[in-house]
Image (cartoon, rainbow, N blue to C red):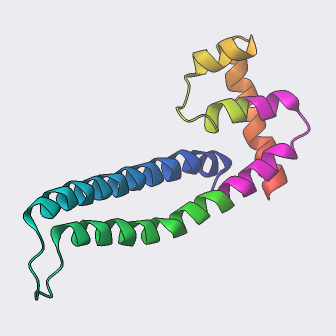
Amino acid sequence: MTAKEQLRQLSTLNQRIDQRIKLIRHYMDQAEKMGGALSQIGHVSGTKEQSPMERWVDKAIDLANDISGEIEALRAERRLICGIVEQMPNARHKQVLELRYFAPVTPTWEQIAEQMGLDVRWVYRLHGEALLEYEKIGA
């Protein structure tokens, strides 16, 4: 995997985890709605069938268990990438990689150039140098 692919992977993992967390919240919201509706109707005794609320809660719990592995993978990958970036001796190289890959929303090259006070072509060049430096350290 190239340096750029490894750095881009952070964003993909973050997005997948965010989607799963939203789905868990949806399931829990549905369970709460069902719980309120069922409490007004009352519980049918003697049935072994799960209530709709229990089904929604079970789905949320199952999903939470599923994403725990993904969250750990993200954390491990982030620690690895951060460790490599921290070892980089050139502060500008660190800065361009952090701005490009560590932000919750990927900024444009123009936005990065503006933040760094540089011309966008210079940022492209720094980025290329930073990727080479990253690969040397990470090898």
Q: Is residue 79 magenta?
A: yes
**Residue 77 at x, y = what percent?**
66, 58
Assign the C terminus to one quadrant of the image: bottom right
Q: Quadrant of residue 93?
A: top right
Q: Taking 93 as reference, is 116 above or below it?
A: above
In the visual, does 120 lie left or right of 69?
A: right
Query: Is residue 37 or residue 121 the one in the foreground?
Result: 37
In the visual, does 1 lie left or right of 97?
A: left
Assign the N terminus to one quadrant of the image: bottom right
**Residue 59 at x, y = what percent?**
30, 69
In the visual, does 43 lie left or right of 137?
A: left
At 59% across and 15% down in the image, what residue appears? 110
Q: Quadrant of residue 49?
A: bottom left
**Residue 7 at x, y = what percent?**
63, 46
At 63% across and 45% down in the image, what residue appears? 4
Query: Is residue 43 or residue 24 the one in the foreground?
Result: 43
In the visual, does 91 lie left or right of 25?
A: right
Q: Is residue 105 magenta?
A: no
**Residue 81 at x, y = what percent?**
72, 51
Q: Quadrant of residue 76?
A: bottom right
Q: Main secondary structure of the magenta part?
A: helix
Query: Is residue 121 or residue 31 the one in the foreground?
Result: 31
Q: Taking 86 as reference, is 71 above or below it?
A: below
Q: Taking 112 as reference, is 69 above or below it?
A: below
At 51% across and 53% down in the image, what residue appears? 13
Query: Is residue 37 or residue 122 the one in the foreground?
Result: 37
At 80% across and 50% down in the image, what residue appears? 84
Q: Residue furthest right?
A: 89
Magenta residues, start to end: 77-95
